[in-house]
Image (cartoon, grey):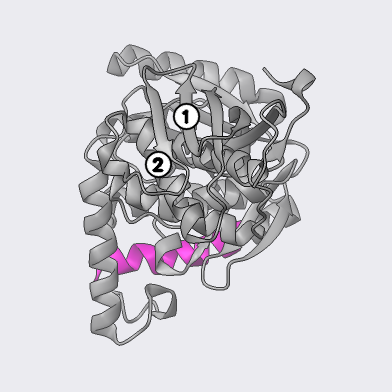
C-alpha cells in the first residue's frame, strides 16, 4: 500500500493505578483501576521500506524491526525494544498490513513502579502502527493484542487490566472491569476524593517468576476445585487456601468498593483498601517491608485507607483521602517513610484521565 512519509501523528496512552482488585484479573475476577495523568507519547511517520524504527527519548538504542512482525522480541537486545517487537508481531497476527514507521517514544511514567509504563508504551505504539497502515481494531481487540505483546516480550503471563485501562480510561472515573465478560462500567470518583500514590523507591524485584508462580497456583487450585476459574469459587471452598482466599475475598471487595465510590462513602472505601492490603500481604504474599511501611505511613498521616497496588514486590502504594488534606498527607507520609527506610519516595495525587488518544501536534510534549 502507498504511504505518505510526511504524515506525522502523535498518540498518547496513560499509565494506571489500581484502586483495588489485584491478582484478580487473570482469575476472571473484578478490578477497579484509574487511568492516571502520566503517559507515554509516540510521535511517528510512515516509512515506505517495511521497517519499524523506534528510538526513545528516555533510553539508549535504536530498534529496527520488520513491519511484518517477523522480528522476535527475544532477538532484541534492549528490554524496551522487546515490547515494540511484541506489538508489531501481535498486530501482524491480527492482519495489520506490514507498513513501517519511524517512531520516537517518550514517557513520564516511572519504570518498574507498577504504574503500567510498558502497557502505555504498547498501547501508544499500537495506535501509531494501526494508524500508519490505515488498519482498525475494536478497542478490546487492541487491548488483547497489547496484552499478548506484553506476554511475548516478557514471558510474564499478565492479565488484561493494564492495557484495557490505558485504552478505556475515563476522565474523573475509575473503571469497574469484569475480567470474565470484559464489560467495563465507569464509576465516577466523588469530587472530594483524592487518589494518592506513593512510589516506594524500590523497583519491583522478583516479580516475573513470582507472578507466574502465583498465577499457576491459582489455576491449579481452580482445577482442583473443579471450577473454570477462581471467579467461580465460593468462600467456603477456599477457606483453608490462602491464595484462593485472597482472590475470592478481593473480588467481593472490588464490588463493594465500586458501590462505596458510587455512594461517595469514602470511609467504607478506605476500610476495603486496608483489608485488601492485609490479604495481599498475608494470604497472597506479594508485599515487602517497604510497601508495608509506606502503607502504614500513609494511614498514620491521615489517609482513610491504603494498600499496595499492582503486582507487588516493590513499586507503589495507593491511598484515598479527602482532597483538602491530600497534599499534607502525602508530604507527611513521604517524610516519615524516608526517615525510617532511607528510600526517597515519589508522591502523586491524581484524578482519572481519558484513555489513549491521538493528540494534535501542538499539544504534544
Ligand atoms: C500486573 C499485571 C496485571 C495484574 C496486576 C496484578 O500489573 O500486568 O494484569 O495481574 O499485575 O493485579
| Between 285 and 202, the one nearer to me in the picture | 202
Q: Answer whether residue 113 is visible to the viewer in this image.
A: no
Q: Residue at x 47, y 29 (%)?
A: 53
Q: Is residue 264 left or right of residue 305?
A: right
Q: Residue at x 42, y 33 (%)?
A: 316
**Secondary structure state at the residue bearing disc 2:** helix
Q: Is residue 127 left or right of residue 262?
A: left
Query: For mark 1, what is the residue?
Result: 53
Q: Main secondary structure of the magenta part?
A: helix
- Which quadrant of the figure has residue 240? bottom left
**Secondary structure state at the residue bearing disc 1:** strand
Percent x, y of residue 155: 28, 50
The answer to if 246 sits in the magenta stretch is yes
The answer to if 202 sits in the magenta stretch is no
Percent x, y of residue 334: 45, 18
Q: Is residue 18 left or right of residue 325?
A: left
Q: Which label sits on residue 85?
A: 2
The crowd level at tag 1 (other Cα within 10 Å; few <14, some 14-19, many 20+) is many
Percent x, y of residue 200: 38, 26
Q: How many marks?
A: 2
| Between 218 and 144, the one nearer to me in the picture | 144
The magenta span reads: 240-257
Amino acid at each position: 500500500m502507498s504511504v505518505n512519509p510526511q504524515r506525522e501523528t502523535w498518540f498518547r496512552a496513560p499509565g494506571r493505578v489500581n484502586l483495588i482488585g489485584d491478582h484478580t484479573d487473570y482469575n476472571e475476577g473484578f478490578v477497579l483501576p484509574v487511568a492516571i495523568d502520566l503517559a507515554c507519547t509516540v510521535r511517528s511517520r510512515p516509512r515506505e521500506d517495511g521497517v519499524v524504527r523506534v528510538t526513545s527519548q528516555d533510553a539508549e538504542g535504536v530498534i529496527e524491526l520488520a513491519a511484518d512482525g517477523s522480528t522476535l522480541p527475544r532477538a532484541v537486545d534492549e528490554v524496551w525494544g522487546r515490547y515494540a517487537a511484541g506489538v508489531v508481531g501481535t498486530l501482524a497476527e491480527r492482519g495489520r498490513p506490514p507498513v513501517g514507521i519511524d517512531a520516537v517514544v517518550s514517557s513520564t511514567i516511572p519504570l518498574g513502579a507498577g504504574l503500567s509504563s510498558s502497557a502505555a508504551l504498547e498501547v501508544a505504539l499500537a495506535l501509531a502502527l494501526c494508524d500508519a497502515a490505515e488498519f482498525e481494531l475494536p478497542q478490546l481487540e487492541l487491548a488483547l493484542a497489547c496484552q499478548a505483546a506484553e506476554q511475548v516480550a516478557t514471558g510474564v503471563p499478565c492479565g488484561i487490566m493494564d492495557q484495557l485501562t490505558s485504552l478505556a480510561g475515563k476522565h474523573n472515573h475509575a473503571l469497574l472491569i469484569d475480567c470474565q465478560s470484559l464489560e467495563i462500567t465507569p464509576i465516577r470518583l466523588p469530587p472530594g476524593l483524592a487518589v494518592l500514590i506513593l512510589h516506594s523507591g524500590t523497583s519491583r524485584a522478583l516479580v516475573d517468576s513470582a507472578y507466574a508462580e502465583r498465577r499457576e497456583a491459582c489455576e491449579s487450585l481452580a482445577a482442583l476445585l473443579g471450577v473454570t476459574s477462581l471467579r467461580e469459587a465460593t468462600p467456603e471452598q477456599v477457606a483453608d487456601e490462602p491464595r484462593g482466599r485472597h482472590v475470592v475475598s478481593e473480588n467481593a471487595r472490588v464490588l463493594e468498593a465500586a458501590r462505596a465510590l458510587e455512594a461517595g462513602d469514602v470511609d467504607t472505601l478506605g476500610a476495603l483498601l486496608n483489608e485488601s492490603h492485609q490479604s495481599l500481604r498475608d494470604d497472597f504474599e506479594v508485599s515487602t517491608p517497604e510497601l508495608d511501611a509506606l502503607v502504614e505511613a500513609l494511614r498514620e498521616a491521615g489517609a482513610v485507607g491504603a494498600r499496595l497496588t499492582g503486582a507487588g514486590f516493590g513499586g507503589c502504594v495507593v491511598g484515598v483521602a479527602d482532597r483538602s488534606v491530600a497534599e499534607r498527607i502525602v508530604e507527611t507520609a513521604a517524610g516519615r517513610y524516608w526517615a525510617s527506610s532511607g528510600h526517597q519516595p515519589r508522591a502523586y495525587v491524581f484524578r482519572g484521565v481519558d484513555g489513549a488518544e491521538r493528540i494534535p501536534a501542538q499539544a504534544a510534549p
